[in-house]
Amino acid sequence: MLLYTRICLLLLVCAFFATHVAENMANTSPVAPRVHSGSTRASEESKSTETAAAKPIVERKVVIIGSGPSGCTAAIYTGRALLNPLVIAGYNAGGQLMLTSDVENFPGYTIAPSGPELIFDLMSQAEKFGAEYWKTECKSVDFTQHPFRLELHNATVMAKSVILSTGADSIWLGSEDEDKYKGMGISTCATCDGFMFREKNVVVIGGGDSAMEEANFLTRFANSVTLIHRRDSFRASKLMLQRVQQNKKIKLATHRQVVKWHGEKGVLSGATLVSTETGETEEIQCDGAFIAIGHKPNTKFLNDGVALDKDGYILHESNTMTNVPGVFACGDVVDRRYKQAITAAGQGCQAAIDAEKWLEELTSSVEH
Ligand SMILES: Cc1cc2nc3c(=O)[nH]c(=O)nc-3n(C[C@H](O)[C@H](O)[C@H](O)COP(=O)(O)OP(=O)(O)OC[C@H]3O[C@@H](n4cnc5c(N)ncnc54)[C@H](O)[C@@H]3O)c2cc1C
């Protein structure tokens, strides 16, 4: 059943790229150095100029960087405000939900859509209101000038306002066969996927507060939770660790690392662990694995163009606006706590409304 779901999921992803983002890829990918200058959806305000040698320059009122739930929602709202948003989708078009099968907690669906299906719906809705998706990455930004300058691989975009929705990628272990079982037993989100492991045996990897939180949370569903950590000292707070130690369903496996994942019929069934003390290996059975070793916000390309916290998350200064007037941020790239599709979407809406109001004020201040 799971294998069948996975095949369907892959087909959906292919359809998704074929119908939505790929169409624009030819215009923006490094191998095809031409930006579509006369898009049928381009508004009056959106112009582009091309010279033989230089990269084409495209002008927009709103550019959204990132195409996960927050970016897509910002695109729906700015599209409906007739701002003709350009969405720079990134090379992980659709964002993190593209990695997951059933999304059971997004409001409005009684039959859970797959992650790619949900993103497909969001993108289609945004396109309906004039949003345009380019499958390319933003390499760098210059927020010291206005309009803001965004460098893509083969185009420069001048934007009156920018919405940053680049997410925070989960940090993975990089163990053998991890990619094979991502979404097929291996997850990085207990809130999202814990429910699917009722009466199963799961492992959690990590030694910080989020690993403790995930382990405790998973005991609501799972028969047993093994917390694997490479040391016997933990970064987690004393209280969180104590809760884990007192929970009868949780077993601690310290001085251990996962070196390889195993599966049956494409679904996770176990792992090989190595002792960080003796180097001995052992095989364990598990139906699910939750990797909780942190997130990395995708903000490197901003090169400190906006204020970040110590871990690289974007800081809001006023509502969803950053310390740079006209630059807004939403979703997981600002959110250290919730990291859910619905919270990202909600903040995408807020950022779009804030950008719209800011542009309105900018126009009226220029007119008066
Ligand atoms: C395995 C897994 C399962 C999950 N399941 C659920 C679930 O069931 N329910 C739920 O509510 N949440 C779930 N989540 C969490 C949810 O996916 C995230 O909270 C949500 O996707 C965050 O949305 P976002 O738009 O902020 O960022 P993301 O979805 O991470 O999107 C970021 C976007 O930014 C783009 N990007 C990054 N850098 C650049 C750049 N330089 N230039 C251009 N684009 C760039 C990427 O290509 C991507 O499109 C799950 C997460 C994971 C990892």
Image (cartoon, rainbow, N blue to C red):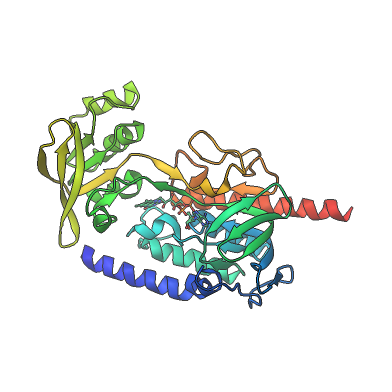
Left or right for 350, reference 109: right
x then y, percent, for residue 212: 30, 32
Is there any visible trace of residue 110 in the rendered image? no
* Position above or below: 100 against 328: below
x then y, percent, for residue 258: 20, 43
Q: Quadrant of residue 307?
A: top right
Q: Quadrant of residue 98?
A: bottom left
Is there any visible trace of residue 116 in the rendered image? yes
Q: Quadrant of the N terminus?
A: bottom left
* Position above or below: 192 against 15: above
Along the line of sight, the residue nearer the viewer: 91 or 18: 91
Along the line of sight, the residue nearer the viewer: 199 or 366: 366
Along the line of sight, the residue nearer the viewer: 342 or 335: 335
Outermost residue on the right side: it is 368
Left or right for 249, reference 212: left
Tell me which residue sits at (16%, 30%) in the image: 277
Along the line of sight, the residue nearer the viewer: 38 or 349: 38
x then y, percent, for residue 134: 54, 67
x then y, percent, for residue 97: 40, 57
Left or right for 204, reference 138: left
